[in-house]
Amino acid sequence: MSDLISVRYNSVARALHWSLAFLIVMEYLIGLTMGDFGIKWLHLQLGYAILILVVVRIIWRITHKAPAMDSSLSRMNQILAHSGHGILYLLMLAIPALGLTLVITKGVPFNIFGIPISPLMEPMAKASRHDIKVVHVYLAHTIIIMAAMHALVALLHQFVLGHPILSRMLPEKLANIIEHKDGKK
């Protein structure tokens, strides 16, 4: 087993990472087109799923230490990586939480995964709900930009700078293929 494999994220962390990445991209695309296709219900349900998975991911992260970063990374790169991850976690929590706030503040019954929920409060003023929606949408654009930057930086480190960052989050067989392509053993 290579040194790379010993510093990889565990299988649960990898599954949560890639599941959330997929769901967030799908949620964003659905959010852009839901008015055209009458699929707001799908957007809402995926948002609830994302919120639940993010909470699970945070609990997992708190209870399971992340592997150490590549020691060849500069202190500044390590600070940037931690900051970027922190911002992504905040966005992953804030966006679905704001979406849920929009649902709750409408003051009408709704459902979560088919479970009916009675109105939890009186309707909020339309202007206030509009402001929440604007923030929800802007943060959704922001997380897509941040996720793209996250992916590009991982690719840059893996294939240009020679730091096995991407490999840490990939399944073992794929990580080994990439490791050998980079000329590492």
Image (cartoon, rainbow, N blue to C red):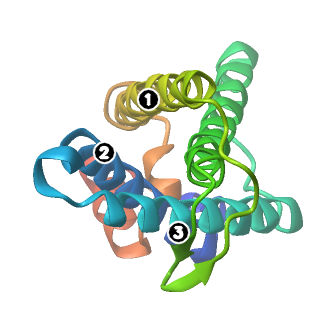
Q: Amino acid at mark 2?
A: Gly
Discs 1/3, front: 1
Q: Position of residue 108 (x, y in %)?
A: 57, 61
Residue at mark 1 to residue at mark 3: CA–CA distance? 18 Å
Look at label 3 and name its amino acid: Ala
- The residue under label 2 is 31
Within 10 Å of disc 1 (Cα), the crowding (few <14, some 14-19, many 20+) is: some
Secondary structure found at label 1: helix
Side of 164 relative to 75 (left or right): left
Res 145 quadrant in image: top left
| Nearer the observer, 3 or 150 | 150
For marks 2 and 1, the one nearer the N-term is: 2
- Is 55 in front, or is 70? 55
Give above or below for 124 relative to 10: above
Q: Nearer the viewer, residue 58 or 120?
A: 120
Examine the rendered structure and indicate whether residue 83 appears above or below residue 85: above
Residue 15 pos. (x, y %): 51, 72
- Type of residue at label 1? Val
Residue pointed to by mark 3: 49
